[in-house]
Every structure is written in C-alpha cells, then in structure tokens.
Image: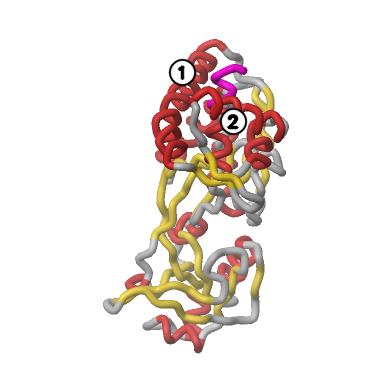
Amino acid sequence: MDRFQELSAFIAVVETGGFSAAARRTGDSQSTISKSVGALEKRLGVILFRRNTRSVTLTDEGQRYYQRAKPLLDEIDSVDSEMTSLTAKVAGQVRIAVAATFGRLHILPLVPGLLKLYPELEVGLVLSDSVRDMVDDRIDLAIRVGTVSELDSVVRKVATTKLVCAGARKYFDKHGIPATPADLSHHNCLVYEGGSTGGVWPFIDSQGKYSVPVSGNLKSNSVETIRAGVLAGVGIGMFTHLSLANELRHFDIVTVLDDFLQETLDVSLIWPNRRFVSSRVRLVTEYFDAALRKST
C-alpha cells in the first residue's frame, strides 16, 4: 500500500477524531481509511490508536509519530500547492460564507477587484448570519467575526474589531444617556439573538468582566434588523464596530458606555482542513487576507 496514503489516512483520523470523519474529509471510504491505518501499524510494528466503540485515541507511540509526521505532510502539501499556483489557471467556483452585514459592508465591495484579477473565477457568496457547516454546504472559505467553532478547520486571523453600544442621538435626547451598564435596565435595548451575547451584554470595569441582562421591544436573529432599529431611533444596540463603521462617522449616531467595553473580536478566514487545498481557493484566501488587513 502507498506510504503517502497510509500517512494521510493516519493524520486524518487523528485530526477528525475517528475513521468515519476521516473518510468524509478525504473522500475515501471508511474501509479504505481503516485498511491504510492498519497497514501503517503493521509496517511500523506498533499500535498507533486505542480503539473502542465510542472513541479513537492515540497511543504514546501514535502521538510521537503524529508530531514527527504531520510537519512533513504539511510541507509536501505546501510545495504541491505552490507549484500548482505557478502553473494552474484560476477558474471555477469558490463558495464563500460570511455574516450578512459584515459581508455587505466589507466583503461585497472587494469582490469586483477579485473578479477583475481572476476573470475566469466564479464567486458563490453566501450571506447569512447563521453559521454554515462548511462540509455539508460545500463552503470553500468562511469569513467570521468572533469565536470559531469548527475544530477541523484552518483559521487565520486577519483583523480585530471591538464591541460598541450605540444609538441614535434622537433616542438619547428623549430617554437620556446611560452612565453605567446597570442603567440599561431603564432603556429599550434591541437584542440580536444570533450571536454569543444575545440578551446578556458583556462589560468590564475595575473589578473585572461581568454581564448585564437587557431587554427591549425588538429582537431578531438578523444584525440588519437590529441595525435598522437603532438607526431609526427605536433603541440601543450592541454591535461590532465594523458593523456600524460608516454610521459612527455621522453626528446622528453615538456610542455609549465606551469605558465599559474593551473586548475585541477576531476577524478570521477559515477553510476546511483538507489534505489538498486547490490553488483557486488558496489564491482567493490570500486576496481577502491582504484586502481585509488593509481595509479593516
């Protein structure tokens, strides 16, 4: 059996946590993965995994082998991709998933430049505040703000953005400006239900981090909806700074409680941790990496 195939199967099992998950990543059958790992163990004369009906874990020998073998496979993949990038024509579709508001404000304006650079490229831009399953939805590249939940992915941080509490000046003229987070109990807080904060907003003071429950007459799983409500003067919202970057330059929209908001969120590029990443996806990733570092 091919030694490269054995090594690839072994690393896929380690990084996905099981034979069936490794098969989904590589596109091989579970039987092929099992045979490849078995052949590797036989050739090395050691047991690499402890197997039971619930889990697959590395033995001490398996852990040492993974630590030595993984960099070698990564280097081979890197060289292959570099050579392919030099000769391959950038054509075909790349599916990109990004949150709706961030995508509209910061990704969509970059797409024309990408298509001008690679005229035969096709971009499938999925704008959704729901976190997409990258494998099931055939996503080649995701651009996320905040915590990344995919364990079997490559994550590259390209920027950061802070949280802000904001409202329209006409709302504050009528209802007053909260001096502390506790004052939010007397305000109409518009709640985005699609993120990690929801109806509990995070703050910090000299004593450390804490959370404040908030409520109001508008809730939504869409940032665009909460954003529209805030701009119309309905109430106060919590956003990433990048979601309101343009509006915060205007007199009509102001931030409050800035001294109590110091948390930052990462802006990350994420792609499935496959053994082979096409030159098309790699070049698109590099394009957004450079563009987002410059624009955000």
Badge 1: how crowded within 10 Å, few (<14), some, or many (20+)? few
Q: Is residue 3 above or below residue 209?
A: above
> Mark 1: which amino acid?
Val
Query: Can see residue 116?
Result: no
Q: 71 left or right of 41?
A: left
Quadrant of the image occupied by residue 23: top right
Helix, strand or loop under label 1: helix
Q: Is residue 52 above or below residue 112?
A: below
- Look at 41% across and 40% down and name the residue there: 293
Q: CA distance from mark 2 to mark 1?
A: 25 Å
Helix, strand or loop under label 2: helix
Badge 2: how crowded within 10 Å, few (<14), some, or many (20+)? many
Query: Residue 21: where, in percent of width, then height?
Result: 65, 42
Q: Which residue is mark 2?
A: 37
| Nearer to me, 125 or 198 | 198
Q: Which segment did they paint magenta? A: 1-7
- Look at 44% across and 28% down and name the residue there: 69
Outermost residue toward the bottom in this view:
186
Q: Which label belongs to residue 170?
A: none
- Look at 45% across and 34% down and name the residue there: 66
Query: Residue 78: where, in percent of width, then height?
Result: 46, 23
Query: Can see residue 44?
Result: yes
Query: Residue 141: where, in percent of width, then height?
Result: 59, 38
Dominant secondary structure (helix, strand or loop) of the stretch shown in magenta: helix
Q: Which residue is mark 1?
A: 79
Q: 179 left or right of 284?
A: left
- Look at 66% across and 28% down and name the residue there: 35
Query: Residue 46: where, in percent of width, then height?
Result: 49, 32
> Mark 2: which amino acid?
Val
Q: Is residue 70 above or below residue 144?
A: above
Inspect the magenta stretch and tell me whether residue 8 lies in it: no
Total marks placed: 2
